[in-house]
Amino acid sequence: MARLFTGTRSGLKRVALLVAPLVLLLLSATGARADLLADIKARGEIVIGTEAAFPPFEFVENGKIVGYSADLLALVMADLPGVRVKRLDVPWQGILPGLAAGKFDYVVTSVTATRERFDRYALSLPVADATVAMLVRADSGITTPEGVAGKTVASQAGSAQLQALKGLTDALAAKGTPVKQVREYVAFDEAYADLAAGRVDGVAQSFPNLADAVKKRPDAFRIITPPFGPKVFFSWAARKDAASASLAAFFDAGLRKANESGKMRELQNKWFGMEMPVPADALPVPVQ
């Protein structure tokens, strides 16, 4: 092989002319693969991860994922004609790890915008309020979040709501009034069932979800107000890499359009019975 390049300069020049187009072709192909939005358009399908057990944001009805996020997603995808949506129902504990591992292109589920997630993922513009409150039984004597001292409380394993709850319980412990126990559940429905049965005394969850739970069972539950913890928002998520930047920008543009047109507020009234004003220009940097 060494003798192949020992000829004249003109011979070397001919080799270079032959190789150059191949290099450009390879670079072009690499560039195409590095643009996830372009790849999605080419294959005509986008794969989306969702935890369909978080009503009224996303849940399964008659074998189909429905809810606030499904309607909002349909509005955004109207600007990507010809692309089919393949939406995977994944337990919450596998959502962000699955995104990072490339099991789906994008996450359309209720991702609380914590600082850790803000730093690791390309979180979208806000889609709803995610401030955490406490759900108790309708006949409970608990009237404030601090009233759970000495009680058994619960939330979903691996969730931002659980972290907010632990912040509350740590503060109570520091005052010498700890809770009895913190239980972690795979899904919030299981926690609600145990709350109704008296096996736990309070469930920490985002206020909009609790409003839906009380709407469905006003005889069983009520919400302790005010909410506790910092003001936070729900977002969607993409991978934080160069290949996903175009896709993240596409979803942000769609959410901004839905917010500014009033369509987002219409969907909030439809699914929550109330409006949740959220910023249309940027996701506020989470404080924790």
Image: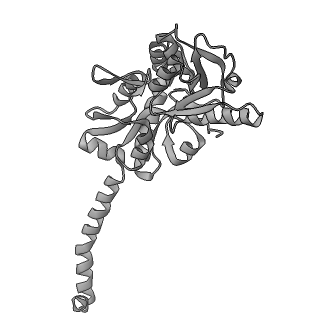
Rendering coords of residue 16 (x, y %): 27, 77
267 relative to 247, above or below: above
Q: Nearer the viewer, residue 206 or 244?
A: 206
154 relative to 9, above or below: above
Rendering coords of residue 208 (x, y %): 53, 20
Residue ranking furthest to the right = 175
Residue depicted at x 46% and y 15%: 266
Q: Quadrant of residue 146?
A: top right
- The answer to whether any part of residue 77 appears in the image is yes
Rendering coords of residue 140 (x, y %): 62, 13
The reply, left or right, for residue 221 in relation to residue 229 is left
Q: Nearer the viewer, residue 162 or 265?
A: 162
Q: Which corner quadrant holds the C terminus?
A: top right
How is the model colour-coded? one colour
Q: Which corner quadrant holds the N terminus?
A: bottom left
- The answer to whether any part of residue 281 appears in the image is no
Rendering coords of residue 39 (x, y %): 30, 47
Q: Nearer the viewer, residue 280 or 85?
A: 85
Q: Quadrant of residue 49?
A: top left
Residue depicted at x 60% and y 42%: 115
